[in-house]
Amino acid sequence: MTAPRRVLLGLLFLKLPIEQLEMAGLRIEGDRAAVQAWVDALDPLGGGFNVVEP
């Protein structure tokens, strides 16, 4: 799986469909079903968290 950074961020943070990401530049080499299973197992990452707490 190779893609521009923005496409991978869309996968991790927004959990966009693979078909949409492929139109944006995602390339899958090998077992597409394995990639889909991995994506299905991901929980979208939340964007709002404190890096440093007082």
Image (cartoon, helix red, strand yellow):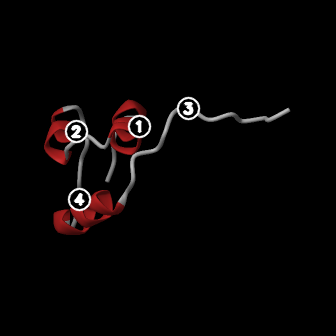
Residue designated by label 1: 9
Residue plotted at (31% across, 54% down): 1
For marks 3 and 4, give the CA distance: 33 Å
Say whether residue 52 is left or right of residue 24.
right
Residue designated by label 2: 21
Reply above or below: 42 against 49: below
The one nearer the camera, 12 or 53, is 53
Residue designated by label 3: 48
Q: Amino acid at mark 1?
A: Leu
User: What is the number of the mark on residue 29?
Assistant: 4
Q: Residues within 10 Å of mark 4 (few under 14, many from 20)?
A: few
Residue 50 percent across, percent down from the top left: 68, 34
Question: In what element is the residue under mark 2?
Answer: helix
Q: Residues within 10 Å of mark 3 (few under 14, many from 20)?
A: few
Residue plotted at (22% across, 66% down): 30
Residue plotted at (18% across, 41% down): 22
The one nearer the camera, 6 or 17, is 17
Q: Earlier in the sequence, mark 3 or mark 1?
A: 1
Locate residue 49: give its quadrant. top right
For marks 3 and 2, give the CA distance: 23 Å
Q: Earlier in the sequence, mark 2 or mark 4?
A: 2
Q: Earlier in the sequence, mark 1 or mark 2?
A: 1
Give the quadrant of the C terminus. Answer: top right
